[in-house]
Amino acid sequence: MEQLTLHDRYFKERYRKFEENLQNDKNDALWPDVARYIARANGTAANPAKTVILVQELSVLTPGAQGSYRPEPWDQHVLYGYGVKPKDLQ
Amino acid sequence: MIVKSLTAAWNRFFFAKQSPTPIALFRIAYGTSVIATLLLLCPDWLAWYGPHAWISLPTMQALEPGRRLNLFTVIPQTDAWINGLFWAFLGSAILLTVGFLTRINSAIVFLCLTSIQQRNLFITHGGDTFLRVAGFFLIFAPAGAAFSVDRLIRIWRRKEGPQVRPRSPWAQRMIQIQLALLYFASFCWKLKGPAWLQGTALFYIDHLDALKRFPVPAWLLHPTALKMGSWSAMALEFSLGVLIWVKDLRYILLALGLLFHLSLEYSLNIPMFQWDILSAYILFVDPADITRAWQWIRCRAFVKSRKPLASEQL
């Protein structure tokens, strides 16, 4: 989102909301569908996607003195891995 | 005696006839919000709701079992049908906004709005939910009784005179109660969050880069200002949920609420949320004040457009 223009961010905000919900373990039932969508969007007939891995990246916000902000290093962990089946690409 | 006066107050509040101009203006603002929401979604209609969407229809049905008002479960799952549904939805929202076949179109808009939310609950925000609930009550409101094509047609057919007939405002009251509940629930949720109670919540919100929009003045990011801002937001949400019913405080609170939402619209990228909520503010304005404001605008427009008379030139 941060890399989009103001105009595009306004149109694509639903993706931020969706990604926020995806990171919640309670919504893990969504992950296979999302993996299949990514496989379809990024594969071609000649070079189909074989595996999709959803990776969560996070950095904790730590307030400093006088309202300053100390960014913690980015952490990442695998949320979900999916082996793509041929029928997923149809 | 108390029961009798309570019943009388209840009947006065929900059923004492009043001018339908606030609900008619709300219809225009509401329809505009729905149109804007649909246009913002337009490039991704199929990505979110199509046959090969991010979330499939069977997954969504498994997560939300039971009978649902969801047109996507009854129409064929093809790109053409999904696009057709959205264009029909958009057309209906435009007709609702101009007030043509108002009741039918408000029912269609509600049905479509409910359907797209049931089809994908994971991309909706509070403003969408408010539109859906308000849309239900709008079906029963006299929303086409003023500022509408329906009214022009009735006047043209001599079924109605120049005066707008007073109507029962119960449906308008239900939308007002819904808005007040929204603020009060938001206040109650914030009470559960330590960051809001400690006054640090706005610090975190300000540093969520994905949500940022336009830059905020540096002095507003000082810890004291952020604390005051966090607590003021809670106080305002409580007031808009509870004190809004006190007539003497109403316009002050509406003005503060307007400032609050405009500042959020400036600083945070949450498309349409502020406008969805602000659209219902008009329902709290006294119909007599709307009439006065309309007459003032007409007078000024008339004075500006009119050429001075010879007697006035002297």
Image (spheres, helix red, strand yellow):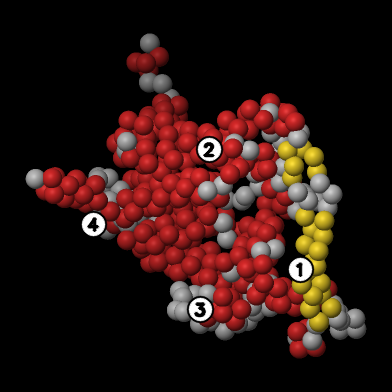
Q: CA distance from mark 3 to mark 4?
A: 47 Å
Instruction: Work out whether disc 1 and disc 2 sit on a shared chain.
Output: no
Q: CA distance from mark 1 to mark 3?
A: 26 Å
Does residue A49 appear to the left or right of A20 in the view shown? right
Q: Are marks 3 and 4 in contact (CB under 8 Å)?
A: no
Residue A36 % position (x, y): 75, 78
For mark 4, name the chain: B
Q: Secondary structure at mark 2?
A: helix
Binning the other alpha carbons within 10 Å of mark 3 as few (below 14), some (14 to 19) or many (20 upward) gives few
Q: Secondary structure at mark 1?
A: strand
**Residue type of the residue flagged with mark 2:** Ala
For mark 3, name the chain: B
Q: CA distance from mark 4 to mark 2?
A: 48 Å
Q: Secondary structure at mark 3?
A: loop
Residue A83 % position (x, y): 81, 82
Q: Is residue B102 visible?
A: no
Q: Nearer the viewer, mark 4 or mark 1?
A: 1
Q: Which mark is residue B233?
A: 2
User: Foreground: B95 or B173?
Assistant: B173
Q: Nearer the viewer, mark 3 or mark 4?
A: 3
Does residue B192 appear to the left or right of B297 in the view shown? right
Q: Are marks 1 and 2 in contact (CB under 8 Å)?
A: no
**Residue type of the residue flagged with mark 1:** Leu
Name the quadrant of the C terminus of chain B. Answer: top left
Mark 1 = which residue?
Answer: A79
Q: Residue furthest right?
A: A46
